[in-house]
Image: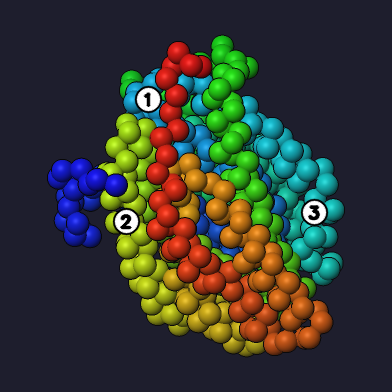
Amino acid sequence: MRREKGIKRGLFSDQAFNRKLISLTLPMALQSLMLAAVAAADAIMLGRLDQNSMSAVSLATQIQFVMNMFLAAVTSTGSILGAQYWGIQDKETLDDIFNMMLRLAVVVDLFFGLACIFSPGILMQFFTNDEVLASIGCSYLRIAGWSYLLTGISQVYLTMMKISEHAGTSALISSTAVVINIVCNAILIFGLLGFPSFGARGAAMATLLSRIVELVWSVVCSFRKRYLHPNLARFFHRNALLSKDFVRIAMPILGASLLWGVGFTSYTAIMGHLGQDAAAANSVAAVVRDLTCCMCNGVAGAGAILLGNELGQGKLDTAKDYGIRLMKMAFLIGILTCLIVIAVIPLVLRFYKLTPNAAELLTGMLVITGFYMIGRCVNTVIINGIFDGGGDTKFDVYSLAVMMWGIAIPTALLGAFVFRWPILAVYACTCLDEVGKIPWVMVHFRKYRWLKNLTRKREAG
């Protein structure tokens, strides 16, 4: 492939790329950090209350985790297509994408929200056989389910802001909602300012209040000048060719999201069945993992949009150059994240009221997590940023089917329930997939099949 004039080879030598990447990465990383901060705040505050409340809510929120996999398929597909159509400023097609995402998000919200409100006991059976944990989890889900009815809609609005050069506003809305959530968490969990102490139910109430603020603000903001808002008169309008493109991209993303989401939920369920100490330690390790994933999540999201903009305009050489830069950055971020996770172990142990055995397990889990994060960061940026940005969404399905479902989950199940391995050995098995994928990912990256222009001329639709 012939290189375009003006493309610089040094990793940080392209100042235009650096500016665009930073302008998108920082708000997206902040948004990811703030969302992870909600789980961290829940874990820290409930951990201060008692270990069982923390473990139960961590298990219960796996329902939202699975729901987010479906929503991710919707919003990721909208972002991939939207970024390329934004590159050519096709506003009518962008409106069709907006409404298509809204229709799908409403369906997902209703399914999971109503299930949590009316059947929490059935859902909790998937994650624990401990009656105490199940009871606390049910009380949380009956209230949190109402917030799930709003989540998808707000995520669609925030996604459209990101691809239309308003990532900062999207981050501001999400971050403010998170601050509201954390403040309300403290008030309602511990009974501050004259309120009664609601414990785990207080965490669910705080989540609901923050979601209401987030959705209202997002909708109002979408009517500002130079922002995108859906023409609801066309809510049920179907663009046949666009729908075909959407499904073609979305189905592999949904498959990958389900494989990954249900796989991670399976990891949590496995650890949850190894006792209260294992469940508690795993809950805290998950919080640390999610907090330290923020930078790679931001770079992946920003990279997908940057690549989409260039590919939509037919600038394949520039997109290839951007992809190579992002790949190199992924390894740097992974190594730095590994060092950060290991360095914060003493600090994390001070934050939680854990039994001596749970604290010992947590230390071991965080050491394992540190090395796992190298693979996690590399794969997130390359697969979810570079490959998805070019519409190459099938690779993730294959890699997850082999590495997670073919190797990591069966090994963890056998280790936990057949061979009765030590808890840390079982936890290490749940981290095999990301590290094992790196060679496979790099081979696929070098084939450059992710360089695709997905846009269609308007008259074809």
The secondary element bearing badge 2 is classed as helix
Q: Write the residue at 66% across / 71% down.
A: 408
Mark 2 or mark 3, which is nearer the start of the sequence?
Answer: 3
Q: Which residue is mark 2?
A: 324
What secondary structure is found at the residue carrying circle 3? helix
Q: Quick check: 180 above or below 461? A: below
Query: Image quadrant of residue 5?
Result: top left
Q: Residue under circle 3?
A: 123
- The reply to whether dot 2 and dot 1 touch (C-beta < 8 Å) is no
Tag 1 and tag 3, C-beta contact below 8 Å:
no
**Marks 3, 2: nearer the viewer:** 2
Q: Residue 307, how many percent across, how many down?
A: 35, 43
Residue 165 screen position, x and y as percent: 33, 34
Q: CA distance from mark 2 to mark 1?
A: 31 Å
Q: Nearer the viewer, mark 2 or mark 1?
A: 2
Amino acid tagged 3: Leu
Q: Is residue 334 above or below residue 229?
A: below
Amino acid type of the residue tagged 2 in the rendering: Ile
Model colouring: rainbow
Gap between marks 3 and 2 measured at Cα: 43 Å
Sequence-first tag of 1 and 3: 3
Would you call the spot at circle 2 few (<14 residues within 10 Å), some (14-19), or many (20 or more)? some
Residue visible at 32% across and 31% down in the picture: 313
Q: How many marks?
A: 3
Look at the image and tell me whether residue 99 can be seen: no
- The circle on residue 253 is none
Left or right: where 310 falls relative to 103: left
Element carrying mark 1: loop
Q: Label 1 crowding class (10 Å Cα cut-off): few <14, some 14-19, many 20+?
A: few
N-term mark: 2 or 1: 1
Residue receiving disc 1: 227
